[in-house]
Amino acid sequence: MAGEPQADCLFCKIVAGEVPATIVRETETTVAFRDINPQAPTHVLVIPRAHYPTAAALAAGAPELAADLLREAHEVAVGDKVDETGYRVVLNTGTGAGQTVFHVHAHVLGGRGLQWPPG
Ligand code: 5GP
Ligand code: ZN
């Protein structure tokens, strides 16, 4: 069923506490934790607790959760004070866009100058 935990999913394991992560915020529906390979001083991943593989699947299957994800991305930016200078929220969707973990996650990047478009 849509949203159910997947046994082979790394981020479902982080939600379950089976894989350690540096958690910065939690809500009833989301978890935010620091990326293991940060690309900026602030690099936090925000995920829904429920398993949806991509942003597209999340938007189609649980739009209210997609809204939670965006709201939490902003709260993370406020928490790290990068909202003051500007931050980027990235949803890599599909292998060609660089998605490597197929449990939807919003990257929150900030704390340094960010060029556009990214390479
Ligand atoms: P994607 O390439 O799918 O958009 O992003 C996946 C992100 O997950 C990458 O930035 C990668 O560094 C991060 N990541 C992969 N494995 C782990 C892990 O075990 N813990 C944490 N905190 N981040 C991870
Ligand atoms: Zn998952």
Image (spheres, helix red, strand yellow):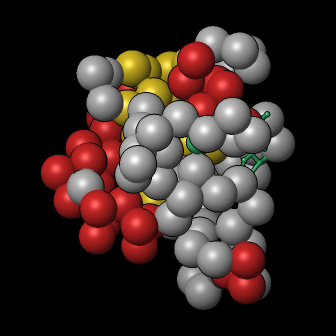
- In the displayed structure, does residue 35 sit left or right of residue 25? right
20 horizontally vs 92: left or right: right
Among the 4 quarters of the image, the one containing residue 21: top right
Q: Quadrant of the C terminus?
A: bottom right
Residue extending furthest toward the front: 1
Between 81 and 93, the one nearer to me in the picture? 93
Q: Nearer the viewer, residue 15 or 115?
A: 15
| Picture layout, residue 53 above or below residue 103 | below
Q: x and y percent of residue 97 in the render?
A: 67, 80
Q: Residue at x 61, y 39 (%)?
A: 6
Q: Is residue 80 visible?
A: no
Q: Residue at x 41, y 73 (%)?
A: 56
> x, y percentage for residue 25?
42, 21
In the displayed structure, does residue 64 sit left or right of residue 9? Answer: left
Residue at 43 percent across and 33 percent down: it is 49
Q: Residue furthest left?
A: 64
18 versus 36 height, above or below: above
- Look at the image and tell me whether residue 15 can be seen: yes
| Location of ligand 2 given as a quarter of the image | top right
Above or below, 31 against 46 in this view is above
Question: Residue 43: x, y in percent?
Answer: 62, 43
Q: At 67% from the left edge and 26% from the top edge, which residue is drawn?
A: 13
> Residue 94 placed where, x, y %?
64, 77
Q: How many numbered dots are placed on residues in this image?
A: 0
Q: Which is nearer the eye, 56 or 23?
A: 56
